[in-house]
Amino acid sequence: AKAGTFANMDGSKSSMAAGDASNACLFAQPGSGICMVYESSEPKLYSTPDQRAALEKLRAAAEKLSGLGELIASSRWTAISQLLGGSRDLREAVGFLTDDDVSKKAAKKVFLDLDGVALGASKRDGKAAQLYFASYSRDMPELLKLLR
């Protein structure tokens, strides 16, 4: 046997191996060459991003963030910070959905707006936070239009 092919020999199948033994060997035990992990026959889970699920996630995150205005008006800084922590879902969804320069620029504006709200909240500056939230309120619908 040549180096690298010994793990696929008929006599080297293990009953304790994971995966489908009729597929290529992904990991062979060093020394013995017995294959321990074979490539799966199942389709890959994330071969392409689920655009519909990402768009639903984006809309849900945007809906949650729409409540920032009331929190800013009532100076609830901790609640604002906690709500902005939920923008991770927004960032993840936008990462899947933006594929051209126009939508990437629109997404960048939205994230700069949210960063401004976060800065205003951290400094307990209601005017700055409200200013950035107003900008976010204009920019987010534009981004949603681009991603439909």
Image (cartoon, helix red, strand yellow):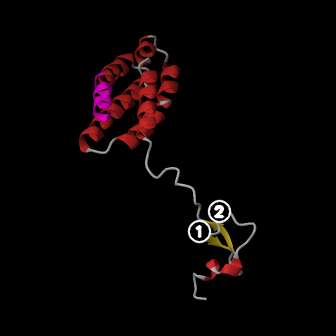
Q: Is residue 87 left or right of residue 42?
A: left
**Which label was assigned to residue 23?**
1
Identity of the residue drawn at 70% across and 78% down: 12
Viewport quadrant of the C terminus: top left
Tell me the distance, in whole angstroms, between the alpha carbons under discs 2 and 1.
8 Å
Q: Dot 1 surroundings within 10 Å: few (below 14), some, or many (20 or more)?
A: few
Image quadrant assignment for residue 123: top left
Q: Amino acid at mark 2?
A: Gly
Q: Dot 2 surroundings within 10 Å: few (below 14), some, or many (20 or more)?
A: some
Residue 95 magenta-highlighted: no
Residue span colored magenta: 138-148
Q: Position of residue 88 (x, y in %)?
A: 47, 35
Q: Amino acid at mark 1?
A: Asn
**Which label was assigned to residue 63?**
none
Q: Is residue 113 left or right of residue 45?
A: left
140, above or below 29, in the image = above
**Which label was assigned to residue 19?**
2
Q: Secondary structure at mark 2?
A: loop
